[in-house]
Image: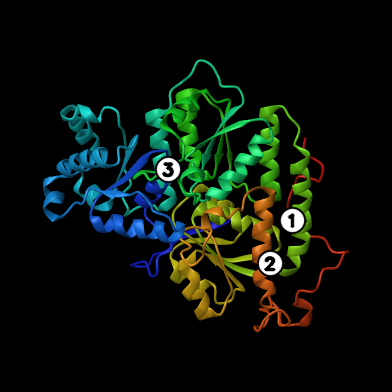
């Protein structure tokens, strides 16, 4: 069990975290025909928009209420009203999602009251759903904003249903899941004869497809009508601790029981998911998935020769840190330095001595004695200064393409992550690359990773034995 420590520095140096309103806007991008709006200054929205555009290499629909000094003091109702009317006229979205920022939260705008008055004055907005979520950017982080947005969607649109939709399951997807991850989960769930309803579903809107026609809103994602039917599902799967609040809210409103999965990356974590799906569907695990499990075991055998004993400096949002850190620990690596962005119950379960809520400066200092740095693209300068390999995870990754299609969940996604990490370490071996191998803990030749020996077995703490799947 890890000890969670919060940095006491006077300011963040090279921040690791991103803001709550950006996380909420990202969640709303997983809805169909939606226009996210930041209630704040133009600069707040511009910085967030640039980050998402650079990461996805796509046009991102994101608007602002364009608050300035005068409107901030007098109140933002007029700005919200004008923004709603302009968006309704120009883009005609099904949903307009408003996220507050630190500016308007400090002022104390009563946005809920504003929206009631605006709807009374403008009946033409009656066919447009408007969602509001409070996301001050001076507290919390990206993951918290995403969680609040999904909870707000459940509160506003989910209703209790007397009858259940057979074989429909809700999947509350955390912010650490990519569009490719959601597609992989969809494939796994459908293999059991179930029909997943993802909330949100960025695989439909941010998967990099080229549409036949242009719209100023999100193109793809979960329709609002589908969210209303979530109350008729037979079960809810919540992926990540951040989805617990939304899952509880859905259960309280519609009586749909939920199961929460801290991670769906790794052998044991995927086993737990498949056992749950087998119990929900009443079907045995398909042979195709059983073969993928066997392939993952072989990948763990191959990869542990290069990851065993490697000291890792890991910086990420809590759920992503837990998922990736647990896998690297299973592969025999040592989590020497763990830095995250915000508080979460999952941090205490990270397989490390300590988890620091800090910034990239803290990560760089902790990485001095490490062999591998794992974080997003803002950690590239630290990796260059220290001469360490960098495994990029999370958002943003603006110096790579295909970010939406990266897969690190399920058996196949776990294999991808193992291969990527192991290949980075292979590049450090003298006969594979120009640099010297960073010897873990010892300088003797005995500590140097050797070529695979069939008598050795991979390091794994998986408690589910081979063949134990139903």
- Which of discs 2 and 1 lies nearer the camera? The answer is 2
The N terminus - image quarter: bottom right
Quadrant including the C terminus: top right
Question: Is residue 249 depicted above or below 50 in this figure?
Answer: above
Helix, strand or loop under label 1? loop
Residue 422: mark in rendering: 2
| Residue at (77% x, 82% y) in the render | 445
Name the residue that disc number 3 marks: 219
Q: Percent position (x, y) of residue 337?
A: 55, 67
Q: Identify the mark at residue 406; answer none if there is no mark.
A: none
Q: Earlier in the sequence, mark 2 or mark 1?
A: 2
Pointer 2 and pointer 1: residues touching (CB < 8 Å)?
A: no
Q: Secondary structure at mark 3?
A: loop
Does 435 sit left or right of 455 as displayed?
left
Residue furthest toward the front?
212
Q: x and y percent of residue 132 in the render?
A: 31, 38
Name which residue lies at 57% across and 54% down.
Answer: 322
């Amino acid at each position: 069990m890890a000890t969670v420590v919060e940095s006491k520095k006077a300011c963040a140096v090279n921040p690791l975290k991103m803001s709550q309103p950006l996380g909420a806007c990202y969640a709303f991008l997983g809805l169909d025909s939606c226009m996210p709006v930041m209630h704040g200054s133009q600069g707040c929205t511009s910085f967030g928009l640039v980050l998402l555009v650079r990461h996805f290499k796509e046009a991102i629909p994101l608007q602002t209420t364009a608050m300035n000094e005068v409107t901030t003091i007098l109140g933002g109702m007029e700005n919200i009203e004008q923004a709603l009317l302009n968006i309704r006229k120009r883009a005609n979205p099904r949903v307009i999602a408003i996220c507050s920022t630190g500016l308007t939260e400090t002022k104390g705008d009563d946005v809920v009251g504003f929206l009631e008055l605006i709807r009374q004055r403008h009946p033409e907005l009656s066919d447009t759903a408007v969602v509001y979520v409070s996301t001050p950017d001076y507290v919390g982080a990206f993951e918290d904003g995403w969680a609040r947005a999904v909870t707000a969607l459940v509160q506003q649109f989910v209703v209790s249903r007397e009858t259940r939709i057979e074989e429909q399951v809700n999947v509350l997807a955390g912010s650490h899941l990519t569009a490719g991850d959601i597609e992989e989960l969809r494939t796994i769930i459908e293999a059991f004869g179930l029909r997943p309803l993802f909330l949100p579903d960025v695989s439909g809107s941010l998967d990099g497809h080229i549409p036949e026609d242009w719209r100023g809103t999100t193109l793809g994602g979960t329709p609002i009508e589908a969210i209303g039917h979530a109350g008729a599902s037979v079960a809810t799967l919540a992926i990540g601790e951040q989805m617990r609040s939304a899952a509880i809210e859905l259960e309280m409103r519609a009586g749909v029981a939920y199961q929460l999965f801290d991670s769906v990356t790794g052998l044991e974590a995927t086993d737990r998911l498949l056992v749950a799906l087998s119990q929900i569907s009443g079907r045995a695990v398909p042979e195709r998935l059983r073969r993928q499990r066997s392939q993952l075991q072989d990948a763990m055998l191959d990869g542990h020769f290069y990851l065993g004993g490697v000291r890792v400096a890991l910086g990420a949002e809590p759920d992503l840190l837990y998922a990736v850190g647990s896998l690297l620990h299973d592969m025999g690596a040592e989590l020497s330095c763990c830095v995250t962005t915000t508080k979460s119950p999952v941090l205490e379960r990270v397989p490390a001595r300590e988890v620091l809520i800090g910034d990239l400066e803290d990560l760089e200092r902790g990485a001095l004695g490490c062999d591998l740095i794992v974080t997003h693209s803002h950690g590239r300068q630290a990796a260059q200064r220290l001469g360490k390999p960098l495994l990029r995870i999370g958002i943003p990754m603006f110096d790579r393409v295909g970010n939406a299609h990266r897969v690190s969940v399920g058996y196949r996604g776990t294999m991808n992550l193992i291969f990527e990490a192991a290949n980075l370490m292979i590049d450090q071996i003298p006969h594979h690359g120009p640099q010297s191998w960073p010897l873990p803990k010892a300088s003797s030749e005995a500590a140097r990773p050797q070529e695979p020996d069939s008598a050795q077995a991979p390091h794994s703490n998986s408690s589910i034995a081979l063949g134990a799947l139903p």
